[in-house]
Image (cartoon, rainbow, N blue to C red):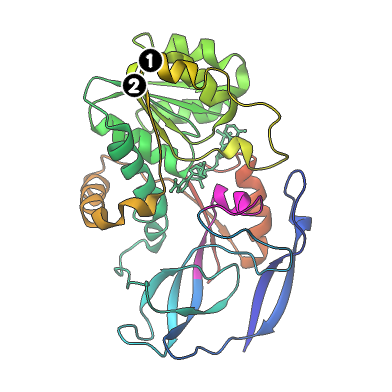
Amino acid sequence: MDNRQIVLESLPQGKLSPDHFRLQTAPRPQPEDGQVLVRTRYISLDAANRAWMQGATYRSALQAGDVMAGGAVAEVVESRAEGLKPGDLVFADTGWQDYAAVKAAGLSKLPDLQPLTHLISVYGVAGLTAYFGLIECGRPQAGETVVVSAAAGSVGSIAGQIARLKGCRVVGIAGGAEKCDWLKSELGFDEAVDYKAGDVRRALRAACPQGIDVYFDNVGGEIFEAALFGMNNFGRIACCGAVSQYDGAAPSHGPRGVPGLIVTKRLGVRGFIVSDFYDRTDIALAELRGWVESGALKVQEDVIEGLENTPAALVGLLAGENRGKRMVKVV
Ligand code: NAP
């Protein structure tokens, strides 16, 4: 009845490495009244996992010695709560471990659809973040130019495709020629900019001759700044995240043009957390499902096997190893 756990051994000061974690074995937890015992099936790897080590965000900061936090699709194995029974699938903050006792309040039973991995990618946080960030914050209109950064990642690859499905011209920003080619040849992006190849501001200008109407920002920092200079008047920026700022020391200077360009261009800049829109999840899932089932939206998943490989998988995600949604199959 052992429970393997990945513990965050020490908080990184610079770049995260697998050495910041350790694997330990503890007894399997016992659920209390109102809790369920779940077995972790697929752990979602998220850029935000690293941001939680920097300080409090929409959740409290991680501390050295904590079992590493993280969301997962998990199966109920024992229930001491109404409404959930063994065999039910839920999405829960299990942490990086085989078993967790979690409060049942707030958990909802997931549909038993195949492949199960889609519950983490397109029908999970990644797909909903892409959908709500683009539709609610970006408000794209057909014919407009939409730019998406971290475009080959889980949120970005879906956000860009939704923009295309809404009739926009879509430009992705990603690291490396291979990812950029893939965005165009497989996902239907109109253009792609390799931010590792040089002057992003100039490359964006060439890729967006009509300027940028909507920028879906996953990375912050210099790429945010480059996009800002290319924005059209009354453009909208959906601030989804800032992965370029997560894995290291705090930046010593901020993007130029803030707030000057925001004012003169009358930009709408809106940060959001996906849960802001959870009351509209059914609408989003219905539309996403229609696109996936008709083949209009391609779902790219990157599944790593084995709980013990989770630390290296997160380090690799931050280094851009992944294409689409990275997750770890535990069982
Ligand atoms: P992801 O996009 O699947 O993977 C992260 C990607 O970021 C990597 O593949 C890498 O691709 C890129 N990257 C890493 N360092 C970079 C840098 N310095 N500059 C530019 N690109 C860099 O990860 P994700 O978990 O889906 O997260 C994407 C963004 O969505 C993050 O900012 C995250 O915080 C945000 N997010 C927000 C919400 C919300 O509710 N607001 C919810 C979920 C996720 P390259 O090879 O292209 O560098």
Q: Nearer the viewer, mark 2 or mark 1?
A: 1
Q: Is residue 305 above or below residue 85?
A: above
Residue 131 percent location from the top left of the image: 32, 43
Query: Is the N terminus in the top left, top right, bottom left or bottom right quadrant?
Result: bottom right
Q: Is residue 178 above or below residue 198?
A: below
Name the element at disc 2: strand
Give whichever of 314, 244 is nearer the camera: 244
Write the residue at 49% across / 26% down.
173
Mark 2 and mark 1 in contact? Answer it, CB < 8 Å: yes
Residue 36 percent location from the top left of the image: 44, 84
Is the shortest distance between ligand 1 and the CB of mark 2 under 8 Å? no
- Pointer 2 or 1: first along the chain: 2
86 to the left or right of 102:
left
Residue that carries the numbered disc 2 in the rendered image: 235
Examine the image and state in which quarter residue 10 appears.
bottom right
Residue that carries the numbered disc 1 in the rendered image: 265
Examine the image and state in which quarter residue 319 appears.
top right
Residue 46 within the segment the image draws in magenta: yes
Residue 91 percent location from the top left of the image: 41, 67
Figure label count:
2
Examine the image and state in which quarter residue 298 appears.
top left
Give whichever of 70, 239 is nearer the camera: 239
Write the residue at 55% across / 90% down.
30
Residue 274 within the segment the image draws in magenta: no
CA–CA distance in space, label 2 to label 1: 8 Å
175 to the left or right of 37:
right
Specify few, some or many for label 2: CA neighbours under 10 Å numbering under 14, 14-19, or 20 or more: many
User: Which residues lie in the magenta part?
Assistant: 41-57
Q: Amino acid at mark 2?
A: Gly
